[in-house]
Amino acid sequence: MATMAERTSDVLIVGGGVIGLACAWYLLRAGRSVTVLERGRPGDGASHGNCGTITPSHAPPLPEPGVLGRALKWMLKPDAPLYIRPRLDPALWRWLLKFMAHSNARDHARGARIRAGLLNASYEALGTLLDETGIDCGLQRSGLLYVFRSTQYLAAHAGLPESLQPLGITAELWDGARMEREEPALRPGVTGGIWFPGDASLRPDQLVAGLTRAVREAGGEIVENTPVDGFEIGGERVTALRSGRRRWAADEVVLATGAWSPALARELGLRLPIQPGKGYSLTFARPALAPRRALVLKEPSVCVTTWADGFRLGSTMEFSGYDERLNPVRLAALRRGAAEFLHEPGAGEPTESWYGWRPMTWDDLPVIGRAPRLRNLVIASGHGMLGVSMGPVTGMLVRDLLLGRAPVVDLEPLSPARFG
Ligand SMILES: Cc1cc2nc3c(=O)[nH]c(=O)nc-3n(C[C@H](O)[C@H](O)[C@H](O)COP(=O)(O)OP(=O)(O)OC[C@H]3O[C@@H](n4cnc5c(N)ncnc54)[C@H](O)[C@@H]3O)c2cc1C
């Protein structure tokens, strides 16, 4: 016999990462009652140990001409920044084929325009979000710097500032001498860099903790240790969510479960081709000679973020399914990459060694929109490498969808309907 729904609210959000919590905050602010159901604790997923950079600079999507050649070369190197573990996984191969089909100049330019719209709107909204919630997560509007040691690699990226300009993103090319002046933390041998003054960085765990507090203070309920494991459907609506013997009902349901979304979508009869793109990070005490702003060390593809009390190296994109192991080869590659570029690349034992699964779509665009066939289900997932950067705008878009308001950016390209 089915148990009565334990509680009803206007909106049920599944997943308490940066995306689910941002949706909760904007909906509460708009007067809706909200319950978040979280499998573990808020921030247990990718939102915890990521690099915390806010990057309009990353508007160009991953699928781009030439990516296939690089990926094939890297597949043979277990410590490469991009690694696809060769295995028989039809969903992964279908995903890769779609990714390759999108790796052309036209789709790349379209993706960059759409992502720039999202990233710029999100960057603008972040300040207000932090002011309104009183969250202190060490936001530093000190930009982000790409660092190159090889002249050829620098030359290959030299056109970036010009190509980003029409997207409203400012970037400057710096020569080796300027790099030395601006970033004493870098070892000699840097040939140049690209400076993005409009980027920022923050402590992602503090952002999640702050959002958790703000959601609760605004009257939202966050139910921890509650994995949603079933749905009840009546006609074209999700009528209840289940976790073990407990049930919840709501007018609207938002699925914000990051890399876990495809399995839950399958339960709902939906196709959501999202692959877990595994990344790693190592956190250390802040070194004496710390970088002045967030860096991306381009050749090894290592992101370096420095906070008042810490220092993080993060990177790698590994397609190895839902593998929960911390791969020592990849952690060592992070340290090695940093040691080539920095005087003080992180000393001693890290205070935290971490992995997270980025929710990756094959067009590198998030999925934000109403699900086909289920009229009260909204998907907010697939933010790939940019979930922190796109958190505020995603919350605003989900609010606009549920309230029937005009969205802050066009939602059509983000619709789950694109997966058929
Ligand atoms: C190494 C690394 C570095 C990164 N650096 C950056 C960066 O610098 N800037 C940036 O913008 N982004 C960055 N990202 C990406 C960013 O971390 C993600 O895009 C973002 O965290 C995704 O947020 P989310 O809320 O969708 O997913 P998650 O944070 O993974 O949250 C999903 C939540 O759903 C919960 N859940 C899962 N299944 C269920 C269920 N059945 N029932 C209930 N709850 C469930 C999980 O426990 C989890 O808490 C990085 C990622 C990695 C791995």
Image: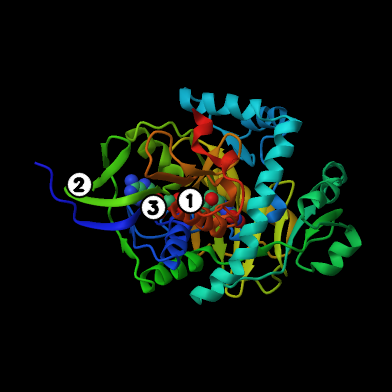
Q: Quadrant of the N terminus?
A: top left
Give amino acid for label 3: Gly
Q: Do the residues under discs 1 and 2 have CB atoms within 8 angstroms?
A: no
Q: Would residue 366 be found to the left or right of residue 33 on screen?
A: right
Name the residue located 82 percent from the left edge and 68 percent from the top edge. 182
Q: Position of residue 139 (x, y in %)?
A: 61, 71
Q: Secondary structure at mark 1?
A: helix
Q: Which of the two labelled residues, at mark 1 and mark 2, occupies the earlier sequence position?
A: 2
Report the Cα–Cα distance between label 1 and label 3. Answer: 18 Å
Q: Position of residue 188 (x, y in %)?
A: 84, 60
**Which circle, 1 or 2, is nearer the viewer?**
1
Q: Which of the two labelled residues, at mark 1 and mark 3, occupies the earlier sequence position?
A: 3
Q: Which of the two labelled residues, at mark 2 and mark 3, occupies the earlier sequence position?
A: 3
Give amino acid for label 2: Gly
Q: Secondary structure at mark 3?
A: loop
Provide the residue designation for mark 3.
15
Report the Cα–Cα distance between label 2 and label 3. Answer: 16 Å
Front in this rendered view, residue 126 or 261: 126
Ligand 1 within 8 angstroms of badge 1 C-beta: no
Mark 2 Cα-neighbour bin, 10 Å: few <14, some 14–19, many ≥20:
few
Name the residue located 39 percent from the left edge and 72 percent from the top edge. 218
Report the Cα–Cα distance between label 1 and label 2. Answer: 30 Å
Front in this rendered view, residue 63 or 33: 33
